[in-house]
Image (cartoon, helix red, strand yellow):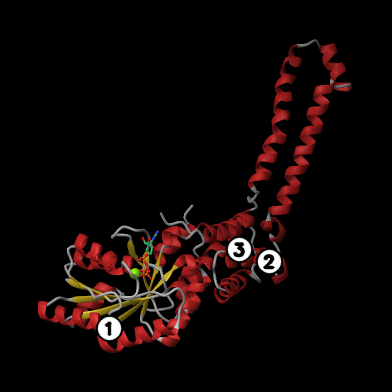
């Protein structure tokens, strides 16, 4: 299940506001409560029709108490609804006039707040708002549908530009195209982001595409890391080269590459250790692995639940180790969603896959169209 509800809500709120249909749930309930007594009194009024003409005349000049209350309640309801409408209908406010920047300041401010709250970085938020300003300032709209279309198209276009800023990499195509044996991929990232699980998912994907692979268990740092990987390898029926606890991770990778060469295996997947924080030990270990294994692809694994910290981690790895592509994990558990936009726009490297669960097939290619569709579906 992928949600990114918060980001979705930020855009939906804006569109609702434009249509003038946005009322907080409590207010909607409040309105229903206020309408109910009026309806009951309306029902009580019907027997009156069967009464005598004189009685009716008397009632017209001096209506009974219940009806007086009903009329008062009705008036009260009309005023309240009107007040609420004028408070929420942005379209009513700007229709037939040329939209100026000050007219949209409030709704943009609210959108800015909601985007930042959804883990969208400052730079990306500003881009979305600037695009929106350019799309609607100076326009004159006579129908709320036209305004809604202008805003929706602007949001979709911004997001498409953000998500397609970097060239996509199709991993399977890349491996086949390169025609190099073995094609070596190293995975790294901080502690617990999902490196080992992602390697198992990639191994499964390769197997499905009839590309053979071997796993290098180069995480010799964490106790039980070898067993975790060996479990996946055995389930997927894929060979693995293990190292002893505390052994040199680069040597394990070297052995795995040699094993792949002698067994004519297509791809080597190298798992590495994570650390609690990005630190010098991790960096020097990774540099050594990269130097010895000479990978064709260096994949940085990032956890979407880390929010803007994922962006910081990526910048750190870029400056200290270097990488070619990102896999973003735990997207299924990310209720915000903005980090996808931030990474796609602010990194100069492509996000190639999203991890969307704990099963082997929970790895989906990153696709702008898919993301936009989910974001704007009802
Ligand atoms: N919901 C969800 N959980 C995930 C995903 N990817 C990994 N996990 C879980 O995240 C936890 C950590 O995953 P690992 O693969 O062990 O992470 P790691 O980066 O190898 O961790 P270290 O080796 O300790 O640095 C596990 O419980 C995984 O099941 C994902 O896409 N979605
Ligand atoms: Mg691991």
Is mark 1 in CB contact (under 8 Å) with mark 3? Answer: no
What residue did someone put label 2 on?
A: 104
Point out the residue furthest to the bottom here. Answer: 291
Question: What quarter of the picture does the N terminus occupy?
Answer: bottom left
Instruction: Give x and y (percent) for residue 308.
Output: 52, 72
What residue did someone put label 1 on?
A: 250
Mark 2–mark 1 distance (CA, rounded to whole Å): 57 Å
Task: State the SS at label 2.
Answer: helix
Q: Is residue 359 above or below residue 105?
A: above
Instruction: Give x and y (percent) for residue 289.
Output: 30, 84
Q: Nearer the viewer, residue 190 or 305?
A: 190
Task: State the SS at label 1.
Answer: helix
Q: Is residue 279 above or below residue 303?
A: below
Seen in the image, is 352 located left or right of residue 13? left
Seen in the image, is 310 located left or right of residue 114? left
Identify the residue at horizontal 31%, vertical 86% (top origin): 290
The yes-or-no answer for disc 2 within 8 Å of ligand 1 is: no
What residue did someone put label 3 on?
A: 114
Identify the residue at horizontal 28%, vertical 76% (top origin): 218
Q: Residues within 10 Å of mark 2 (few under 14, many from 20)?
A: some
The yes-or-no answer for disc 3 within 8 Å of ligand 1 is: no
Instruction: Give x and y (percent) for residue 24.
Output: 65, 49
Q: Residues within 10 Å of mark 3 (few under 14, many from 20)?
A: many
Identify the residue at horizontal 68%, vertical 66% (top origin): 104
| Ligand 2 located in image quadrant | bottom left
Q: Quadrant of residue 214?
A: bottom left
Mark 1–mark 3 distance (CA, rounded to whole Å): 45 Å
Task: State the SS at label 3.
Answer: helix
């Amino acid at each position: 299940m992928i949600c990114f509800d918060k980001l979705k809500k930020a855009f939906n709120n804006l569109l609702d506001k434009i249509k003038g249909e946005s009322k907080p749930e409590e207010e909607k309930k409040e309105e229903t409560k206020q309408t109910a007594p009026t309806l009951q009194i309306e029902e009580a009024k019907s027997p009156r029709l069967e009464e005598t003409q004189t009685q009716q005349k008397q009632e017209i000049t001096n209506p009974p108490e219940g009806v007086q209350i009903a009329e008062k309640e009705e008036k009260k309801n009309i005023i309240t609804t009107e007040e609420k409408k004028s408070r929420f209908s942005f379209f009513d406010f700007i229709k037939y006039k040329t939209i100026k920047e000050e007219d949209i300041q409030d709704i943009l401010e609210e959108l800015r707040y909601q985007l930042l709250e959804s883990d969208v970085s400052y730079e990306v938020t500003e881009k979305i708002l600037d695009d929106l300003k350019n799309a609607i300032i100076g326009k004159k709209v006579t129908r709320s549908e036209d305004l809604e279309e202008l805003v929706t198209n602007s949001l979709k276009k911004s997001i498409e530009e953000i998500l397609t800023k970097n060239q996509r990499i199709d991993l399977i195509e890349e491996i086949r195209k390169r025609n190099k044996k073995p094609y070596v991929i190293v995975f790294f990232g901080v502690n617990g982001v999902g490196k080992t699980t992602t390697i198992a998912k990639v191994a499964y994907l390769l197997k499905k595409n009839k590309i053979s692979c071997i796993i290098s268990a180069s995480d010799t740092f964490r106790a039980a890391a070898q067993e975790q990987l060996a479990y996946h390898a055995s389930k997927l029926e894929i060979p693995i080269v293990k190292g002893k606890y505390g052994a040199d991770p680069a040597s394990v990778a070297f052995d795995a590459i040699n094993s792949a060469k002698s067994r004519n295996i297509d791809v080597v997947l190298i798992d590495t250790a994570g650390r609690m924080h990005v630190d010098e030990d991790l960096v020097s270990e990774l540099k050594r692995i990269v130097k010895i294994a000479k990978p064709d692809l260096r994949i940085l694994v990032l956890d979407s639940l880390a929010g803007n910290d994922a962006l910081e981690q990526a910048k750190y790895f870029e400056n200290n180790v270097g990488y070619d592509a990102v896999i973003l994990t735990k997207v299924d558990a990310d209720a915000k969603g903005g980090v996808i936009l931030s990474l796609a726009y602010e990194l100069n490297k492509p996000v190639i896959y999203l991890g969307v669960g704990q099963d082997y097939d929970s790895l989906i290619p990153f696709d702008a169209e898919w993301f936009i569709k989910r974001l704007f579906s009802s």
